[in-house]
Amino acid sequence: MPDWVASSEDEELILVNTDDNVIGHLDKGACHDGNGVLHRAFSIFIFSETGELLLQQRSPEKRLWPLFWSNSCCSHPRRGEEMNAALVRRLHDELGMRSELNFLYKFSYHSPFGDVGSEREVCSVYAGRSTDEVRPNAHEIAAWRWISAAD
């Protein structure tokens, strides 16, 4: 099971305009302060061979939405990092898994978390299947579970 801090408030993220064109870089903490600064992100949905969806409960160490249930994996590419490399890195660092991922769509959103900060992202969504054992990183994930469509 991975057990290292996989991200920090100091890592530089990719600032983008509403068309997802790069306009600069800023540390993750500043990207999430106040109303947030628009930056590039991704969201991954992992399915089992039987069609169940992997969900995770965010770690209590997370600044935004600690202990909230979420998709399989979400994060940001870092400055100078291609999206595919970021997808592989985070899927491994958070869940200890591999998967071929398919791009589904991209959307922009802004979501404040009380007075703590905000997400303001252009988010690319990916989905894939995996038979790998889930090996969650305790610094990233408090709990996880597979759910069926009936759940």
Image: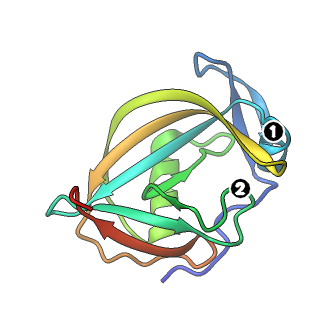
Q: Residue at image x 84%, y 43%? A: 33
Q: Is residue 3 left or right of residue 149?
A: right
Type of the residue with mark 2? Leu
Q: Mark 1 highlights which residue?
A: 26
Spatial CA distance of label 2 from label 1 is: 18 Å
Q: Residue at image x 42%, y 58%? A: 72
Type of the residue with mark 1? Leu
Q: Mark 2 highlights which residue?
A: 64
Q: Residue at image x 67%, y 19%? A: 17
Looking at the rendered structure, the secondary structure element under dot 2 is loop
Q: Position of residue 16 (x, y in %)?
A: 67, 25
Residue 8 in which image quadrant: bottom right
The residue lying toward the viewer, choosing from 117 and 130, is 117
Q: Position of residue 71 (x, y in %)?
A: 44, 55
Q: Position of residue 24 (x, y in %)?
A: 77, 27
Q: Position of residue 77 (x, y in %)?
A: 60, 44
**Please, is residue 86 above or below residue 5 in the view?**
above
Specify the farthest residue to the left. Answer: 50
